[in-house]
Image: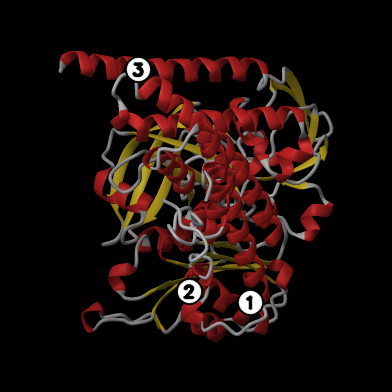
Amino acid sequence: MVTTLLISIGIISLISVFLALLMVIADATIGNYGTVKISINDGTKELEVRGGQPLLKALNQEGVFIPSACGGRGSCGMCKVRVVQGGGEYLPTELPWINEEEKKNQVRLSCQFKVKTDVAIVIPEELFSVREYTTVVEKIRDLTHDIKEVTLLLKDPAKISPKAGQYVQFMVPEYELTDESVYRAYSIASPPGDSSRVELEIRLVPNGICTTYVHKHLKEGDTVTINGPYGDFYLRDTDRNIIFIAGGSGMAPIKSMLLDMEKQGNTRKAAYFFGARSKRDLFLLDEMRELEKKMPNFTFIPALSEPQPEDNWDGEVGLITDVVRRMTKDGSNSEAYLCGSPGMINACITVLNELGVLPENIFYDKFS
Amino acid sequence: MTESMIPFAIFFASIFTGNILLTNYLGMCSFLSVSKELKTSLGLGAAVIFVMATTTPLNWLVYQYLLLPFGLEYLRFIVFIIVIAAFVQLTEMTIERYSEPLYQSLGIFLPLITVNCAILGVSLFMVIREYTFFTSFLFGLGSGIGWFIAIIAMAGIRQKMKNANVPPALDGPAITLVIAGFMAMAFMGFSGMIALS
């Protein structure tokens, strides 16, 4: 009995060791492409990496982070990068994500494209400032019955410099809902001024991998890994009037923009429409009223779509789109910043177009 | 049938009468997900032929000379899987290194089928049916060709179906499974010719 057991363990180990050895040898010989050079943005930055690995991974190791949600399995299509030299043919695994326009621009899926020779790539300038941060949860606070505000204190590196309105990716480790770590994007709610902290507003979505983790498992003092900042949702430097529209945790980037405006002494005319179902979904009212006092050109307009009798609500009532339509005369000299669910954003874009806001002056951050 | 004809009967039977996909319903997941495009189906089908034709005799050797002598037949599931995975990985690395066009058309699909149940299934049938080394090779090759034919046929049908008015509830995998059922019935037409045992 014991001998059979030993023999079977022995044989299995023998086969495994032999095959593992074979793989190691193959990796060092066949899979060895030497060192290759990656030249970024016309030589602004030159990297030397081990050849044969996916571009995404190679860049990652050198501290250049390309946004990616699936972790390099070619299933989210987010990690697109322009490879202007040394690209070669498209792989069948990239094609589902690449359209004709992108083909002309030599856009590649960086998790599938492997660097085997020297390549030249073009990435948005802002990605250079993207880093991975180790942080500690400093505070968790309930904003409403289903939205929590999480304050992260940066440890390594200790400082971040986002633009107001940008987002970070939050790494959820393995736990009961996921058997591998995944990333989810959340807007930064704190103003850029405080470079040592990042505040996120996270609404509980039933069975959401990250939101469940944050609401049910995350405690003060826990370590959290984030990377960022990403995104082109930030305040444009113009003189136009501003229309902010948000719902639920869409408050986060708008709050960051407003606090930044206040700090910079920005006197542009701004109206902030915040939509909620009933009073229990409203939050940060005092902070917004405070901002109204400090900024004479700013108005905060919360609106409830289904006010409850016990709410004693005397503010605006109706869908946020109706309230925006009612309270905006002429949008032709306005810029709009929207953050919320895709349904809300699409409806708002239609209304804003009707009010005369030019499509190129509408910026949004859709939850997906 | 004379003794010398048997290997070729097995080869023929594994393609038609005992088609691994349509009679055993093995390798269904990649069959359903990749059969949307004819071009990718060709690549995946070719990869399956190659892997089946090579891993089946390889596993025959491992089984005959490593497992049987020590009475370790019950380890064949795990051992076969490891052998297939390592072999496929090595082949992929080699192809990627030495032939870009071949990697484009075939190599890229290899990792997709490493853990395909049809590949393991063929190796396990080979053991149950007590094939020789040569018949194992023919059986692997034939099963691969059978799988290839099935996915090509399905891809052709699905491309035609793009212009058809499929009821929304049936769209996607559902209608594909229904069609696979019809195809299996059509292949039953071959079954009187030769039986696999």
User: Could you tell me how far apart the alpha carbons at marks 1 and 3 are, in whole angstroms?
Assistant: 51 Å
**Front in this rendered view, residue A219 or B100:** B100
Determine whether, in the image, residue A63 is placed left or right of residue A246.
Answer: right
What amino acid is at disc 2? Val
Amino acid type, residue under disc 3 in the picture: Ile
Residue A169's place in the image compared with A247, above or below, is above
Q: Which of the two discs, 1 and 2, labels the residue nearer the N terminus? A: 1
Q: Which mark is residue B178?
A: 2
Q: Amino acid at mark 1?
A: Met
Give how far apart the Cα atoms at labels 2 and 3 are: 44 Å
Chain at numbered mark 3: A
Q: Which-is-in-front pick, marks 1 and 2?
A: 2
Q: Is residue A126 left or right of residue A5?
A: right
Q: Position of residue A356 (x, y in %)?
A: 70, 81
Q: Which residue is identified by label 3?
A: A11
Q: Using a 10 Å C-alpha cutoff, classify the residue at mark 3 as few (fewer than 14 neighbours), some (14 to 19) or many (20 or more).
A: some
The residue beneath circle 1 is B161
Query: Which residue is farthest front?
Result: B2
